[in-house]
Image (cartoon, coloured by chain):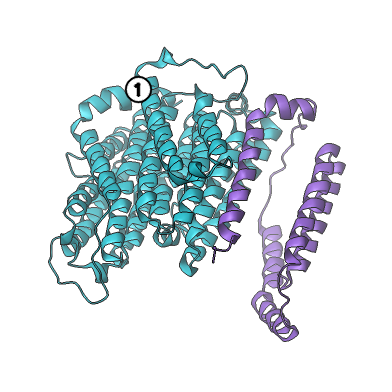
Chain colours: A cyan, B purple
Amino acid sequence: MPNLFVLGPFFLLLILNLPFKPLRKGFAFWSVGLLLLVQMFNALRLWFMPGSSVDRLGSFFAFSLAIDKLSLIMLFTIAIVAFVSLLIAKSTIAQERQKFPFFNLLLISIIGMNATVLSRDIFSLYVFMEITAVAVFVLMAIEKDKFTIEGTFKYLVLSMLASIFILSGTALLILTAGGTSFSEVRSAFSSGHNAVILNLASGLFLCGLFIKSGAVPFHGWVPDAYAHTQSAVSVLLAGIVTKVSGIYVLLRLFSSVFVLKAPFQNVLMSVGVISIVFAALATFTQSGFKRLLSYSSISQVGYILLALGCATPLAFAGAVFHFFNHAIFKSLLFVNAASLKKELDSTEIPIIMGLGYRLPVTRATSLVGFLSTSGIPPFSGFWSKLIIIIALLASGRALYAAVALLASVLTLAYFLYFTRNVFFIKTEAGPGVHAASVPLGIKLCEVMLAAITLAAGIGFPFMLNTWILPLRGIFN
Amino acid sequence: MTVRLIHSVVGLAITSAIVSVLMYRLGSPLAAVFELSVCSGLIPVIFITTISFTQRVSKERLRQRRRERLAKFLYLPLILIAAWLTLSHFLKIPQVDLPIPYCGPDVRVMLWGLRRLDLLGQVVILLTGVFGVVILFKEPDK
């Protein structure tokens, strides 16, 4: 079964590029959409019925892939965000000839992300992280304007730097562990030999993954990359790519492969707290909606790093739950940005101020997204932040818990200011703003993501027993 | 830091050749052969072929760019020397006994038997490169 999550998109990619014109016209969109729906269904099915998978391809394609509960949550999240990105692309990419390459590159990024979350080998994990990154570089540059190229170039350069760190760490692991599989590396850490080299390798991985995650002070590429790219690419990049390439790999490696010693815990928690506070304060100075969301993303990533640094099973479960919630409500907010861009032709706050009242669906769903980001009940963001804060308090880190709580108040402050001025004050449109109808695809995405955010919050008792608490067993 | 693309490509080929020699000296002759043939041979050939389709920059423009580059990067060697002197004076690197490198199975067994997933990854990255070239460099139909 794990092979199908990688081979399915791969074979679809080959089929779509056969020399038949009808494949390009309508079949591409529907086939990719169907594939993603099947991935969502299979991820849920395997969660509730673990023994139901039959790997008919296992003997023919013997890949070192494996599924566990963390992988299933990632696969489900990847499918949702990629599906939303697909619908947004259909509605917002103006040139028809750009849509088919977009669908192909989206498939490649899905292959990369799926293989990343299923891989049990560090070098294979790196290969597929790079595949995802290269596909996203091309997607980001699809519009070829000056600001887009600038954002892409910044992401490319810093991503290459991260790759250097990760590859250097991998080389040290090969030297000490004799291989790159998770079990071999874990054994090397457990043996206690070559501690200096293993610590150096852990440090190099940490640096590289901080850059990939966009944590402060490695966040330089994030605002330009998120703000200047095409709407569907922003949703994909901010919603899932950064999370899988950076956050998931950190969660996987430092929870069950590397040994998370006290110095690394302190580094993770420090970077987490700095990211939370710095990014929350930086949002106050932003004049663009997408730049504001990019700094908000950096702040939310800080919560996940803080939880991982706490190094307890409950904190790990809270980190994964916040990963899922953030992917959903941040994607929702970027979809709202796509709606504003489509309707008002701008996402600059001074221009759109007082004009958002024309978009009732966007107004209502953005409120859901903002309140969830700020950690207001009964939305999903409240529960994941609560679990993280409880885990911090239980491990005797009250100061970190207090900072995390106060930063939520800052988050709420800037979001309330934005929401009030854009969506709840009426202003007549200026000469540069033209009205256009928001496509059904965008509205559907807004409603779907808002519904998931609300359902995950209201259905928290079900989520806690079914999804969150079982994750504690993954943390070693 | 050169302004001429062709010099950059030649620099890439020379660097790859040096890496290839290092790999051979470290006991990986097969890896050295791949590095030499692909990174030092095939890739520069593709780059040079592509550059041959581009328009030459005028000599005056070339001289101006060289001056700009020199002004921008003049301080860099000084910083590197200062950093080297500072680090060698203050930084005490602990003596670490490196373990003997593990010599795995034959490269054919490694590639086709143990690293099959990475081979799939290589195919996918090639496809990504193809799409990248088509999207970024193809001119729109008139």
Q: Quick check: A50 above or below B33?
A: above
Closer to the camera, A46 or B84?
Answer: A46
On screen, residue A439 versus residue A226, left or right, reads left
Are there few (<14), some (14-19), or many (20+) residues within 10 Å of tag 1?
A: some
Q: Can the viewer see residue A114?
A: yes
* Residue A238 pos. (x, y %): 40, 50
On screen, residue B29 versus residue A201, left or right, reads right
Q: How many marks?
A: 1
* Residue A110 pos. (x, y %): 48, 39
The residue singled out by tag 1 in the image is A470
Question: Mark 1, chain letter?
Answer: A
* Residue A234 pos. (x, y %): 40, 53
Q: Which amino acid does label 1 sit on?
A: Pro
Q: Quick check: A306 above or below B5?
A: above
Q: Which residue lies furthest to the bottom in this view?
A: B60
Closer to the camera, B16 or B9?
Answer: B9
Q: Can the viewer see residue A73?
A: no
Q: Name which quarter of the figure residue A421 lies in.
A: bottom left
Q: Residue at x 57, y 19 (%)?
A: A57
On screen, residue A232 versus residue B76, left or right, reads left
* Residue A473 pos. (x, y %): 40, 22
